[in-house]
Image (cartoon, grey):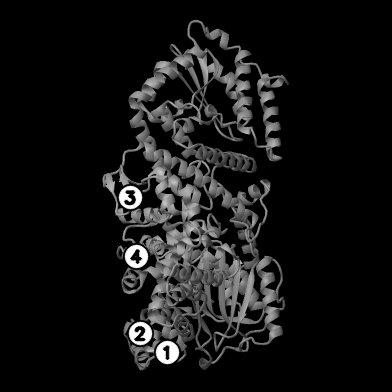
Amino acid sequence: MVPNSTNDTRSPIKVLAERRKALFSRLEQGAMRGFLAEHTRALDDYFQESFEKSEVGPRMRVDKNPYAVVALGGYGRGEQCVHSDVDLLLLFRGKVPAEAAGLVREIVYPLWDAGLEVGYATRTVAETLKLAADDFEVLTSLVDARFLCGVSFLYTDMMERLQEVLKSRGKAFVQWLAETSEARHRRYGDSAALLEPNLKEGQGGLRDYHFMRWAAAALHGAREPRDLEYLGVLTHGEYAELCLALDFVWLVRNRAHLLCGRKCDQLHFEYQHKVAASLGFSSHGNLEGIELFLKTLHSRMETIKESRQVLLAGILPRRAGKKSGRSRVPGVFVRKSALEFDSPEAIVDNPKLLVKIFAESARLKLPLSVEAARLVREFSHLAGEDFSRDPEVAADMERILTARAPVLGVLEKMLSTGFLPRLIPELAGIQNRIQYTEYHVYPVDKHSVRTVQTIKDFAAGGGRFPLAAQLYKEVSPKKLLLWAALLHDVGKGTTRENHAEAGAAVAERIMLRMGYPRRHAELVGFLVREHLSLVKTATRRDLNDERTAISMARLVGDATRLKMLYLLTVADSVATGPKAWNDWSASLVKDLFFKANQVLSHGTLASKKTVRELAKKREEVLTLAKSGEERKAVEELWDVLSPRYVNDMPAGRIAEHVRMFRGLADRQAVMDFSRGPGKDVRAITVCAKDRPGLFSRIAGVLALHNLNILNARIYTWRNHVALDEFFVTRPADPLFEEEAAARAGADLARALSGDMDLEAALQKNLSARMAKKPGPAPTRREKVVVDNENSGFFTIIEVHAYDQPGLLYRITDTLYRCRLDVWVAKIATKADQVVDVFYVRDFDGQKVEDEKRVEEIKRALEEGVLAINQPACPATPPSRKTGEEGDIP
């Protein structure tokens, strides 16, 4: 029986708990220096004291079967973070005795009771070494082994024999480390370029540093971190930078552990503001505190990533290719399949080699050597603003952008070495700059480089983007499109508002400085200024309103500019991240492109052919009728269908809607659920007797069933029947989509008949959903824009807000209470941000143009968006007057 030592106030576990509490308190107050070592030492003292006071230990006869307690993993390295695991090895010379279980109960169980995660193994030396030789996972843990207590020579003997294992299997071990490292990077991503980085496992995380230690130990017998400098793997400056980077990442990791109350290596949005504030980051210039914190973190993780790559370049065999010889550029040569400078003096004599070596890298598809990259960093100061005025330098930069080979690696290396911001100083403002939203996956500089690469990928063929691939072949000059891709977000370095306008002026200045003619500079400036116009218009305006396409055609002016703008739009969205570009947004942008191109080619969307096509469509619908009664219904209904509805809908859909109408009879509504235009999009069609607030009630029911609305098309026939189509994300469980749709249909009927308290049901549902993991805290207020200029028939209302469950219901319910009737809705969601656009008229069928009334509506919407229970336009409005057919475009 093990005595209950926790009753003794001087027990080892009590002392450890008090020491950890004091350490964590100091850490919370900002005292990080020495924390890892002190936390490790506190655990060491616990094990050593527990060993000394052990009742089981003396019975195990250490003289006959020596044993030792050994620290492994992060604990072995002395990197014990707040909630890191504690890994142990109970090592025996001979057979593991039965009493070993009692020793475990003495020293491990109290730690478990105290809430620590402890892993242990009991093995003999022979078993341990055999496992290490057979299993590289075991070998990895033993490389970090550190003696704690017991018989020290047993540990020393194991480590000496372990060196023999490393000598015999070192190269294979390092190759395995490199392969598992690459697999880990594929799984967790590039932490130096992600908004929710994994501080440990991602590329640029702490595990990359551990890889360096393990590889150096296997190949060079390194035991201490400083050996990376002594062995010549890193220069003195590189090692100093690595230490600074590690200290910051450990600081952030420990803060995250404290905030989470558990081990937490993924820096989720919900903790980022708290960590930044706890570290004292505050707004500076046009950077908010959270953005400055993430900029610093990404910079530090970039250092760790680069340090790993330096070591990797020196230990792994080069791929097949041109292994040595001269290049086309005097002063640059190839050695071991990497580019080198002849000497530092060659760079001093000819600074243009700094850009020429990258041009050669793009041409030959070869990387810079470690030493060449070091020299670029050291001599980047030679590339100033006047440097880029040199025609030869501008030509080399153009070659890098237009090289047929993928240029992502070349441009990224130009960024990581600091050369690209030296060559183009305006890019310094976006280096490691964070866009604090869920859909911006990468920092601005890396996003810009990825945008260039995405356009380059269009040249490789159709793939996911056949239209883009075709258009890329047609546009010329391609170099200007690629320049626009690189510079499209440069304005974010100077302003938080209207970065496209600011960036256009900066881009033109850069192009002129690099010797391009003014017309080329103005084209790049145009593309930068308007790079958001296509996607904004497509997702915020009614594409069936001819004015939309005409306005876009007037904006771009000619077909070449339109094609370039389309390519830049797609590349920008794709490079932003998966939440910024989906099947739905792609179809909208493509639709607007084709319509604007039609206007540019033929001067109008309408033609004499349109009338004939409408007549032909009527005949097609009649042909699709399945019975004489259905055919008669089509003939009776045709004259009450609005031209906008007939023009929008294909004949097959109109026939389906006629069947839905015939099934309506005395029911409140009929709902149909089908597949939408994308694999993850579903179409919900509602045929209902029109009434005030119908749209908001449908939106509320869909929110109740967690169906996120992507877009909506609303039509009112002249017989007071509403035909509304909603495009939504598919239900969470794809196996029970039909059941989910049936439940939503039943709830809609109940909501319309008054048998359901929709508001109460939503409150209950949304309260539970809002309690789940939040996204990034908003960095700007919601905004409401009322536009009476861009439509002759409707007032256009834009609501900019951060997305949250039930938002669309609250907005549309507010519009209803403000006596407004929604005729067209454009629902545009990018991850956490929403721009919902509504084409509305008042209940008398008129636009809302009175300034006082406009302000009332704006105020009501702002209150409705900002506060879930805030009353807005509280008076229940009277029933609307349905507009005449001629009022509907």
SS at mark 4 in the image: helix
Sequence order check, earlier mark of 1 and 3? 3
Of residue 158 and residue 15, the one placed in the foreground of this image is: 158
Sequence order check, earlier mark of 2 and 3? 3
SS at mark 3 in the image: loop
SS at mark 1 in the image: helix
Which residue is tagged 1?
638
Which residue corresponds to the image point at 45% horizontal and 45% vertical from the top-left? 374
Residue 188 in the image: x percent, y percent? 46, 46
- Tell me how far mark 2 sits from mark 1, CA to CA: 10 Å
Sequence order check, earlier mark of 4 and 2? 4
SS at mark 2 in the image: helix
Name the mark nearer the viewer: 1 or 3. 3
Q: Quadrant of residue 318?
A: top left
- Tell me how far mark 2 sits from mark 3, CA to CA: 61 Å
Amino acid type, callout 4: Phe
Name the mark nearer the viewer: 2 or 3. 3
Amino acid type, callout 1: Trp
- Tell me how far mark 4 sits from mark 3, CA to CA: 22 Å
Which residue is tagged 4?
458
Residue sitting farthest toward the top: 64
Amino acid type, callout 2: Val
Left or right: where does residue 273 sit relative to residue 689? right
